[in-house]
Amino acid sequence: MEESATLAASLSVYGIVPKTVESEFQSIELSEGCFEIVLDWARLMSDRVLAECRYLVLPHGEALSFSNVSRAQPLSGLVKRLKNDWVLEMIRDDRFTTYYQPIVDAANPDKIYAHECLMRGLAKDGNIVSPGQVLDAADEEGMMFHLDRICRLRAIDGFASQGVDGKAFINFNPTSVYNPVACLQSTVAAAKAVGLKPDQIVFELIEREHVADEDHLLRVVNFYRAAGYGIALDDVGAGYSGLNLLSMLMPNYIKLDMHLIRGVDQDSAKQSIVRNLLQMARSLNIRTIVEGVETKEEYEFARQEGADLVQGYLFAKPAATAKGARGSSIAA
């Protein structure tokens, strides 16, 4: 078979010769920690072949036979696990840090209202791993609950250590919370331990997929709201954060999706959408945050249309130290 020839050729680079068993199967012997060989081979294979080929890991010394081959699983599953093994190690070892981006008063951008606390993963060598990579891998492995909890607690501790005034906006995926009571208890304990009051923390709800159980989402949000925490809905105007979710949750803040703001001063359609979202929020007594502001023209439009708060590279990029923290400058 062509796949067998490709496997044999790729393994020969490592000095490994596959053994044919019962003329139907091939077995290879790998030393501990050599699963990167599988990933090398997988890069040469199509998705169809990976789905059709099957694998079985046997203890050293146990021979491959028809009696145990029934336990074989699709090779694609092993490849997926090996590709995401790094994120499981990252979560296990708690290799995360927090970056901070200021949210400023739209009428007076020198005045910092809050900081958004942003998760950053740390590779073994200390380099930053992009949050998108971490989230995607954790989601594939069903580890969003553990990731969300670690990053939520790390953000609370990190923000308190910065010694800055204002609020902390902490990203929070409520669909990953199975038990709102236990989740709330750990959050309250962490905030209390570092001296933060509930009214200093705003949980920014992020949705990576459509909310299937809206009742559960509302229960989670209401648990936190009843405890005195603020609620913000992220990316309004894009993705799954639709108007039905807004009307159901009635958050304290909404953040307008950054793609609506990009070049808004030159796009009449975007202007109309942003203008109406801002007006709607005012009528509902919800404070607005325009994020992703990169130019003075985008900022001027948001300010003139009555946005309460703004956030973006025009004012400051996310950094390991919060603006206004000990030893830092408030100026962007």
Image (cartoon, helix red, strand yellow):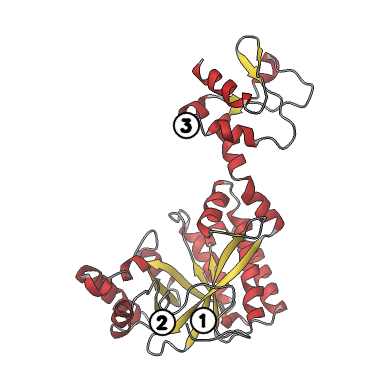
Q: Determine the image quadrant of residue 122.
A: bottom right
- Tell me the amino acid under the disc marked 3: Asp
Instruction: Report the label total.
Output: 3
Q: Which residue is mark 2?
A: 309
Residue with the most extreme left position:
268
Q: Earlier in the sequence, mark 3 or mark 1?
A: 3
- Whether pointer 1 and pointer 2 mark residues with C-beta atoms closer than 8 Å, the reply is yes
Q: Earlier in the sequence, mark 1 or mark 2?
A: 1
What residue is rendered at 37% in x and 68% in y? 258
- Classify 10 Å Cα crowding around label 1: few (below 14), some (14-19), many (20 and above): many
Q: Which mark is residue 293?
A: none
Alpha-carbon distance for marks 2 and 3? 46 Å
Q: Find residue 19 and report its horizontal and vertical position in percent.
A: 67, 16
Residue with the most extreme right position:
61
Looking at the rendered structure, the secondary structure element under dot 1 is strand
What residue is rendered at 41% in x and 82% in y? 309
Q: Find residue 205 and report its horizontal and vertical position in percent.
A: 49, 66
Relative depth, front residue between 293 and 74: 293
Q: Which residue is mark 3?
A: 47
Q: Which residue is mark 1?
A: 114
- Tell me the amino acid under the disc marked 1: Ala
